[in-house]
Amino acid sequence: MRITLSLVALMAIAAAPALAETQPGPEQVIREASELTIQAIDGRREELKQDRAALFAIVDEVLLPRWDRSATGQAVMGRYWREATPEQREAFINGLYRKLLDSYGEGILEYNSDQLKITGTRGDPDKGLAVVDSEVKLTDGTVVPISYRLRFHDGSWKVFDVIVEGISYLTTYRNQYASEFRAKGIQAVIDELQASLPDSSSGS
């Protein structure tokens, strides 16, 4: 899933169409994330390879306003969401998001804006759900289809899933964590998730 996360600048909802029209649309959200990322790293790639904290901050600044952390966390927990305490839910959401940031940061310094081509939007934006389809051309010429699933929530469009060559980020993690929750219990999984996360304040 590293390709997915390195290109993200990156559930039912009842959203009024009038609100959606006053905010950037789904395609614009993806384009803006790409453009802002390039602006932030251009001229600093070598520096950022050595400064993990600075890179982490850039990724967080671009991704946080455009990623629906709660929707992703709840969907990944699945039925275990109902069993978790509010504190466990928040800890899992934060841990999963930090894991996303770390994975995204690993590939972002190799990313160039001309690699991404948006090919269209599907779904029903008027009902607050959309899928933005795109293609990414890798350095070896391979073209990889990537789709972004978004929902209109709290006044703006936000990504909650990314699908690379038919493989869903959300579904992959939901399947992985379902077996772990079942085998180890909610708190043990959260403890392991938090322990696995690197220190974002470190310089390397």
Image (cartoon, rainbow, N blue to C red):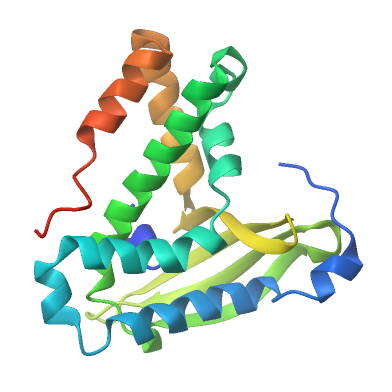
Identify the residue at image location x=73%, y=55%.
Answer: 154
Residue 25, placed above or below residue 153: below
* Image-based side of 130 in relation to 81, left or right: right
Q: Position of residue 124 (x, y in %)?
A: 81, 61
Residue 50 found in image quarter = bottom left
Q: Position of residue 33 (x, y in %)?
A: 49, 74
Q: Position of residue 172 (x, y in %)?
A: 43, 39
Identify the residue at image location x=59%, y=19%.
Answer: 79
Residue 131, placed above or below residue 142: above
Residue 118 visible to an observer of this rendering: yes
Identify the residue at image location x=40%, y=26%.
Answer: 177
Name the foreground residue: 46 vs 146: 46
| Residue projecting furthest to the front | 201
Identify the residue at image location x=74%, y=74%.
Answer: 23
> Disc count in the image?
0
Looking at the rendered image, the quarter that the C terminus falls into is bottom left
Residue 184, placed above or below residue 23: above
Residue 7, placed above or below residue 183: below
Name the foreground residue: 57 vs 161: 57
Residue 9 visible to an observer of this rendering: no
Q: Position of residue 159 (x, y in %)?
A: 58, 58
